[in-house]
Image (spheres, helix red, strand yellow):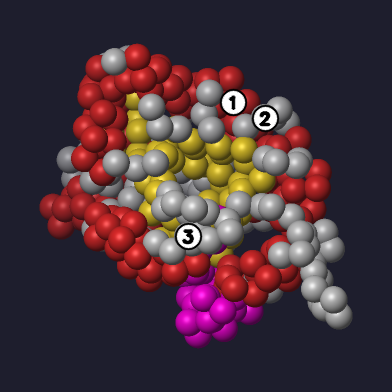
Amino acid sequence: MIPFSVLDLSLIVRGSDAATAFRNSLDLARHAEALGFHRYWVAEHHAMPAIASAATAILIGHLAAGTQHIRVGAGGIMLPNHAPLMVAEQFGTLESLFPGRIDLGLGRAPGSDQETMRALRRDPTSADRFPQEVAELLHYFAPPQPGQRVQAVPGAGMDIPVWLLGSSLFSAHLAAHLGLPFAFASHFAPDMMEEAVTLYRQRFTPSARLAQPYVMLGLNVVAADTDAQARFLFTSHQQQFVALRRGRPGQFPPPVAETEGLWTPAEQAGIDRALACAVVGGPETVRTGLARFIERHQPDELMIVGAIHDHAARLHSFALAAAARHALAGA
């Protein structure tokens, strides 16, 4: 059975705060480690009231320090927000502190809106330079050459896995060209998933970093003891999605028993389309849904997103997902 991993946005639920979100993330990381999940990633977002992982490298250090062996990383760092040298130094530091456990996923989106992008001092055209900035970052991780004055210290000569993240064909093509593993954001932008994965696998060029293509797909999984309970929990994610589309993001909302009147039919269609890659239900529904998704799309790894308001329910959801993986492995 393929590895299962976790993508965590370090959710700030309504009425709570970032400190609580960080405690919950560490608790979930330890839980995921005990359940056998392969890696635990957090993502860079800015000025989002529901997401506490803006200072991504700092949070990775906190999570790695509180766990023993699970891989911890960024899913991802939005590279155009940063100088490649500084990213190399940050992740070189993390790798020095937690050798063999750090991943670096790279994206080219701002992780924010246009106004926040300006506050980050980001050049609006910086995404166009993404391939060059990835190449520069990889250069800083390579062993330093004689006479090379600008070096990542620490970072130079370190074997830190670098992933490209994407929701379109652009990063799929670049990952294939550079011979890097590829993670597709199918958990919120599934439209081009199949085309992007096919392109990546067909055009993959082996590199010193990776001999064969490796695809990780994002999948929303909300599991509970019954289908009805899971559908209830999933309404938090649906509400948050609509709030983002309306340009009114807030802290992560509690679930609701009835969604009638909370959004329009057009917004419902948007939810259904964006969150199409979701497995929501009780243990048997989740097991069947995971099996179908894996069989249809043939990922090398699943990155599971469990956006659930109640922390205990979220822990239980990941436990049920791990149990489903175990059952599928023994099938």
Q: Residues within 10 Å of mark 1 (few under 14, many from 20)?
A: many
On the question of residue 119 being in view, the answer is: no
Q: CA distance from mark 3 to mark 1?
A: 31 Å
Q: Is residue 274 above or below residue 281?
A: below
Quadrant where the C terminus sits is top left
Left or right: 127, with 81 as reference point: left
Is residue 129 within the magenta segment? Answer: yes
Q: Tell us which disc is closer to us: 2 or 1.
A: 2
Corner quadrant of residue 208: bottom right
Q: Secondary structure at mark 2?
A: loop
Count neighbours of disc 2 (C-alpha within 10 A) and say few if under 14, some if 14 to 19, many if 20 or more: some
Residue at disc 1, secondary structure: helix
Q: Nearer the viewer, mark 3 or mark 1?
A: 3
Residue 303, horizontal then vertical, whole percent:
43, 40
Residue at mark 3: 206
Q: Position of residue 20 (x, y in %)?
A: 64, 35
Q: Residue at x 76, y 41 (%)?
A: 98
Query: At 32% across and 34% down in the image, what residue appears?
Result: 234
The answer to whether the residue labelled 3 contacts the one labelled 1, judged by CB atoms less than 8 Å apart, is: no
Does 317 sit above or below residue 46?
above
Residue 109, given in percent of the width and then of the height, sits at: 47, 68
Residue for badge 2: 69
Amino acid type, mark 2: His
- At label 1, the amino acid type is Glu
Dot 3: what SS?
A: loop
- The residue under the point 21% across, 40% down is 296
Location of mark 1 (residue)? 33
Q: CA distance from mark 2 to mark 1?
A: 7 Å
Tag 3: amino acid: Pro
Span highlighted in magenta in the image: 105-133
